[in-house]
Image (cartoon, rainbow, N blue to C red):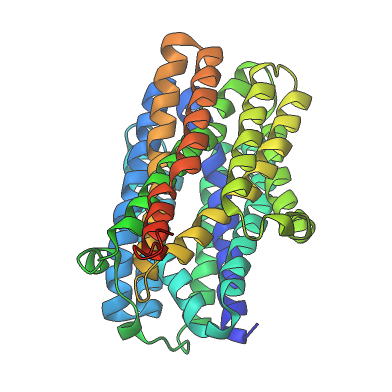
């Protein structure tokens, strides 16, 4: 990998480490420390995700106009100010205000990181994005592991540690990203691309696929929302809950090379790969429904991570294959927005379900949603297949 990409990878790892001190524990803090219901906690996380979506869209526009360096510095600056504010004022309602600002600032950063990664190593193809993905999960593994220990001592130090690591990220960006040259004319934002899409059949196919993708994210997001609070109610220490996310990140980083060899059989059938991953997702929630000890949650997390490794990389790969030439950014934008949408809906839906009906009802609903996701994945390309058959049909021969 080129030096510029290594700097982006290191920055992303530091960024993910800092944010992983906080996001797995948000619901616990709101529910246990601030004394709010899970519905309120879910609503707060929904606002945080909505701010991230806004940040993503604005960040993409800023990248086109200002370039990646200035956009990243702006996003980091906004996030650092909010995190230091959170260190000082972390009661109610200050917490919700600063958390929204953190979501907005970090949302500005991500589009530029990914766009710059693709620019500095074009010949690397997906390898550049895979490197960023692995860096994210490495940060998740380290940050979530340390976050549980720090929170057990003092929750206030969580906010400070997050702010200090973002300050390190700022130094990396200031001294490392200034010289990274990108051709901003080669990039267009999701909004700009929207009016240029002509191949509606492929777009509709992607939207159907992403409908199931969103449902999976609704389920996945419960782990950092309702499940986190549930573990506390069962008497599982924060250290052990944070360890679950360490297992998630470490399994992705260490297990990806092994999994890549095993899934070569799905190289020409990504639909089947996604469906198998969704079935595994469903299995994780079945295990979770009966979990009362840490070992049950540990097993469910391992199962969930295996499903994640099958589904998450495959959806953007299909989006890339469906995208007409020059529309790759728009199609990937749909995928990213769908994931964020799932993270918006999931905590609020989960909080309402648990407050009204309990965890068992929530797990039942999540299993049903994944069954629906398996169905949408099965039919997403049906219209494309019909279109292909019509294009190969010749009236003269009737074939």
Image coordinates of residue 158 in percent, x first then y, are: 56, 45
Query: In the image as oriented, which residue stretches furthest toward the front?
Result: 396
In the displayed structure image, the side of residue 342 where residue 249 appears, left or right: right
In the displayed structure image, the side of residue 334 where residue 151 appears, left or right: right
Judge by depth and name the residue closer to the eye, 377 or 86.
Answer: 377
Which residue sits at x=44%, y=54%?
Answer: 385
Question: In which quadrant is the C terminus drawn?
Answer: bottom left
Q: Is residue 208 above or below residue 57?
A: above
**Quadrant position of residue 331:** bottom left
Q: Is residue 144 above or below residue 58?
A: above
Judge by depth and name the residue closer to the eye, 134 or 276.
Answer: 276
Q: How many marks?
A: 0
Does any portion of residue 285 appear in the rendered image?
yes
Judge by depth and name the residue closer to the eye, 371 or 352.
Answer: 371
In the displayed structure image, the side of residue 254 where residue 134 appears, left or right: left
Which residue sits at x=63%, y=57%?
Answer: 139
Image coordinates of residue 23 in percent, x first then y, are: 52, 43
Query: In the image as oriented, which residue stretches furthest toward the left?
Result: 195
**Quadrant position of residue 220:** top right
Does any portion of residue 108 appear in the rendered image?
no
Judge by depth and name the residue closer to the eye, 284 or 208.
Answer: 208
Which residue sits at x=47%, y=70%?
Answer: 113
Image coordinates of residue 117 in percent, x first then y, are: 51, 76
Query: In the image as oriented, which residue stretches furthest toward the top?
Result: 357
Image coordinates of residue 285 in percent, x first then y, are: 62, 26
Q: Is residue 329 above or below residue 369?
A: below
Question: In which quadrant is the N terminus drawn?
Answer: bottom right
């Amino acid at each position: 990998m080129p030096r510029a990409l290594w700097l982006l990878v290191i920055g992303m790892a530091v960024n993910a480490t800092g944010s992983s001190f906080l996001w797995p524990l948000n619901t616990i803090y709101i529910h246990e420390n601030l004394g709010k219901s899970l519905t309120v906690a879910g609503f707060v996380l929904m606002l945080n995700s909505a701010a991230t979506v806004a940040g993503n869209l604005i960040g993409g526009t800023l990248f086109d106009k200002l370039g990646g360096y200035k956009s990243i510095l702006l996003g980091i600056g906004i996030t650092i100010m909010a995190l230091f504010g959170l260190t000082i004022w972390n009661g109610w309602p200050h917490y919700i205000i600063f958390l929204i600002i953190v979501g907005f600032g970090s949302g500005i950063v991500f589009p530029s990181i990914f766009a710059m990664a693709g620019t500095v190593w074009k010949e690397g193809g997906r390898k550049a994005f895979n490197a960023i993905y692995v860096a994210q999960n490495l940060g998740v593994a380290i940050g979530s592991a340390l976050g549980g220990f720090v929170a057990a001592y003092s929750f206030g130090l969580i906010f400070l540690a997050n702010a200090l690591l973002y300050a390190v990220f700022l130094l990396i960006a200031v001294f490392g990203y200034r010289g990274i040259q990108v051709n901003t004319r080669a990039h267009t934002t999701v909004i700009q691309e929207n009016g240029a899409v002509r191949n509606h059949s492929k777009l509709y196919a992607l939207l159907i696929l992403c409908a199931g993708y969103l449902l999976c994210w609704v389920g996945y997001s419960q782990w950092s929302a309702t499940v986190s609070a549930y573990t506390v109610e069962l008497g599982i220490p924060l250290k052990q809950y944070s360890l679950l996310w360490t297992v998630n990140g470490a399994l992705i980083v260490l297990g990806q090379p092994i999994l890549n060899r095993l899934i070569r059989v799905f190289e020409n059938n990504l639909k089947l790969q996604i469906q198998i991953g969704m079935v595994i997702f469903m299995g994780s929630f079945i295990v979770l429904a009966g979990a009362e000890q840490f070992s049950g949650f540990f097993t469910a997390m391992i199962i969930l991570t295996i499903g994640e490794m099958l589904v998450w990389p495959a959806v953007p790969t299909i989006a890339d294959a469906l995208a007409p030439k020059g529309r790759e950014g728009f199609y990937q934008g749909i995928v990213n927005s769908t994931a964020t949408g799932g993270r918006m809906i999931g905590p609020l839906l989960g909080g309402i379900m648990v407050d009204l009906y309990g965890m068992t009802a929530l797990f039942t609903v999540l299993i049903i949603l994944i069954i629906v996701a398996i169905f949408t994945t099965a039919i997403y390309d049906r219209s494309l297949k019909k279109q292909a058959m019509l294009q190969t049909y010749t009236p003269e021969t009737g074939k």
